Amino acid sequence: MLNLRFLTKDLKVSRRKIIALTLLISGTLAWFFLLSGYLYDIFTNMTPTEPLWKNYFNIGQGLFYGFAIFSAVIGGFIGKNINRRKLLITWILLGTFSTLLTVFFHGLIFLIISSSLLGISLGLGLPISMAFLGDCTVVEERARISGLIILATFLIAFIGKLVVRTLSLELSAALVLFALIRLMSFSALAIEKCDARQIKIEAQVPKVAYRDFLYYLFPWVMFCIAAGLAINLIPATLEYASAVSLGNNLRFISIAIFGVISGIVADRIGRKPPIIIGLIMLGFSFALLGFSMSYSSVVIYLVTSGIAWGLFFVIFLAVPGDLSISGSREKCYAVGYTLPLGILFALSTIPGWAIFSNSSSSISQLFSLILFLSIVPILLAKETLPREKVHDRQMKEHLENIERLIKENKE
């Protein structure tokens, strides 16, 4: 059995809260990553007799991401003023119901309704659940707990994909499975109340925190733009489809493993090193993709980008909590995750590889340059892990080593 004691050792947060946080957020994110891979099948299956089903797929996808963005903004701004627990219950049940709705109902009207509800059930409670992470954790432990959440997210998603393929599940059965995974978040509310704290905010977020938030947000946005467009560089042939399938499976594993590593590193030496490493890795992988397009380079790109995604996912679960205070965190998480969703929505309208077929090398080089330049704002940003926390950890570990040596010498 996987031993994660090194991740939870000496944490101030109770295990009860850690389990609740992990179930609440990872159940939702795993549901989203699984569902996003089946959107084409879902929306085309809902309009099988329509002559313009491809256009209807674009409508469904647009509504899904559009309502996700809109509802995340709404959730971010109303989250502190309403009962958090009641909203989370409604959000989780809506996600489960809207997933099952796509199984039993068909036609254009239900495509519009279900895609809109799916978007709302993704975005509405996401900033609130992530703000709960920020409220429950202290800065020197936030990245490690975020790493646990990302590990759980992609293990669940990987197992979900494995079950679908191993059992050769049809779309309807796969959607029922995804609904059950979405319902998993409900168990978090049985473990922990997740009530909104009644906090009187005496201090205001300093203006410098907003500036630093923008410094951190810029490379995250550039990363999403580059990674979102990069898939269009890969030719849409059977050979490369096989490479993409293998690479995506390995990518899920890479995200899970390096999410944990990112959490450990970020709590020991700071948030900035994992971001810089992720930007450099993705920059070089883009360069490789443009220099030599082959089965191997596509797999290497997808695995490398998975490592970078693992580093980024954890850091951007932690940083909005680091730079905000209770009562304002919902807004920070709404902006931090709404903007990438907006980019994903915009990129989904790109028709495909044909656009880049004559200039894939130059496009790759441009992406690489943008990612390397994105390191500059990170260097300008303030490190959100206080140096005294790093020194305290080092001193504690040093004293523990001395005590161990003394004990060994006595024996």
Image: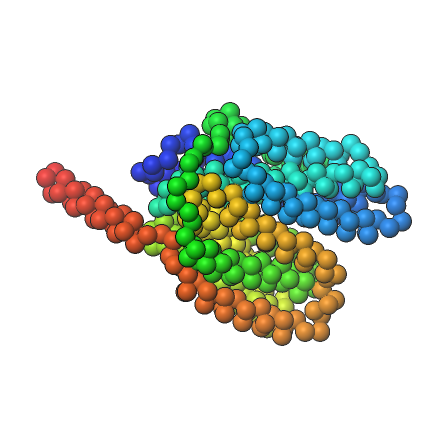
Q: Is residue 154 visible?
A: no
Q: What is the x, y in percent for residue 242?
A: 67, 56
Q: Residue furthest front?
A: 202
Residue at 77 percent across and 51 percent down: it is 58
Q: What is the x, y in percent for residue 128?
A: 53, 39
Q: Quadrant of residue 34?
A: top right
Residue 405 vertical placement versus 186 (above, below):
below
Residue sitting nearer the eye, 179 or 320: 320
Q: What is the x, y in percent for residue 99?
A: 69, 35
- According to the image, what is the colour scheme of the structure? rainbow
Residue sitting nearer the eye, 189 or 177: 189
Residue at 68 percent across and 40 percent down: it is 118
Q: Residue furthest left?
A: 410
Residue 324 vertical placement versus 366 (above, below):
above
Q: What is the x, y in percent for residue 148?
A: 45, 42
Residue at 10 percent across and 39 percent down: it is 410
328 to the left or right of 125? left
Residue 405 vertical placement versus 348 (above, below):
above
Residue sitting nearer the eye, 288 or 334: 334
Number of numbered callouts drawn: 0
273 to the left or right of 164? left
Quarter the C terminus occupies? top left
Quarter the N terminus occupies? top left
Residue at 65 percent across and 35 percent down: it is 95
Q: Quadrant of residue 75?
A: top right
Q: Is residue 121 visible?
A: yes
